[in-house]
Image (tube, rainbow, N blue to C red):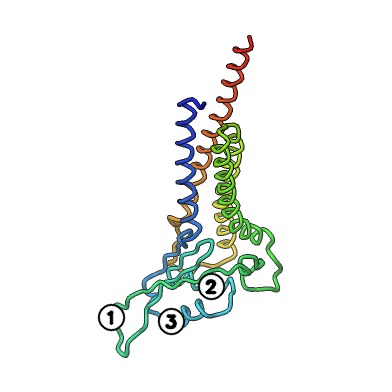
Amino acid sequence: MVDNRYATALVIGSVLSLLATVYLSIAVGTQHWYQYRSPPGNHEASNASELREDFINGEFDEKTYSDTLFRLNGTLGLWWRCVQAPGQSHWFKEPDPKLVTQCVSFTLPQQFVPKYKEPGNHNTGEDLLRTYLWRCQFLLPLVSLALVFLSGLVGVCACLCRSITPTLGVGVLHLLAGLCSLGTVCCFLAGMDLLRRVSVLPDGVYVSLGWSLYLALISSPLQMMAAALFLWAARSHRQNYTRMTAYRVA
C-alpha cells in the first residue's frame, strides 16, 4: 500500500516529466534556437532571391548557409535553418514586398559533417571541438527523450507489479535525462560562440536566443525536479516499510 504523500509525489513527478517531454520535443522540432536580425535593406537587395535559392537548393556548406542566415534574418535550430526573403516577384516592383520564411532541414549525414577551423575552407583542418559539440547537441536530446521513454516503461511495470521500488530507477533515469537536456543547451551555446569567433558578422546584424532554446532549458530543471520527487518517494517509502517490518518483528 502506498502512502498518500508518496502517491502525491509520484503524480506531481509524472506531470513534471510530461511537461518536460513536451517542451523538449517542441524545442527539438522547431528552429528558433538562435536568431539573426538583419538590417531592413538586406531584403531589398538584388541578390536576396539568389541567396535564398542557393540556401534552399545549393550544396551544403557551413559558410554559405551561415552568410545567408546573417543577411536574411536567419533562424537556426537543431534540425532546421530558415531565412526570410521576398516571395515571388510580379512584373512590377512592389513598394513593400512580403517576406516569406523558407526552411531547410539538416539531413542525418549533414549532422555528422566535420566542422573546419575556417568555415567552408577544408584546407584549414577539422575543428574537433566544434565538430563534437555539434554532434552532441544533436544526440543528447534524443538520448534524453529515450531515457524518459524508458523510465515510463519502468513506471508501467512498477504499477503492474504494485511495487514502488522500481521508482528509484525511474528517478535515476529522469536525472540523467535532465543532465542530457542541460548538456544540449550548453553544447549548442558553446558551438555558436565558437562559430561567432571565426565568422565575421555584417554591420548592423544582431543575434539573440530564441524561444526554442528556452523551452529546452526549462525542460532540464523540470526533469530534475521530477527525478527528485521519484527518488524521495522511493527512498522514504522503503525506509518506512523497513521500520514497519522491524516493528512487527519486534
Marks 3 and 1, how far apart in space?
16 Å
Q: Would you place residue 70 above or below residue 154 in this image?
A: below
Residue 95 numbered tag = 1
Query: Circle 1 — which element?
Result: loop
Q: Which residue is mark 2?
A: 65
Nearer-the-camera pick, 104 or 238 = 238
Q: Would you place residue 143 above or below residue 13 in this image?
A: below
Residue 49 numbered tag = 3
Position of residue 36 measured from the top left corner of the image (x, y, whole percent): 45, 64
Please state, as top left, top right, bottom left or bottom right, where the C terminus lies in the image. Answer: top right
Residue at image location 59% in from the left, 56% down from the top? 137
Residue extending farthest to the top is: 250
Q: Amino acid at mark 1?
A: Pro
- Earlier in the chain: of badge 3 and badge 1, it is 3
Q: Quadrant of residue 130?
A: bottom right
Query: Circle 3 — which element?
Result: helix
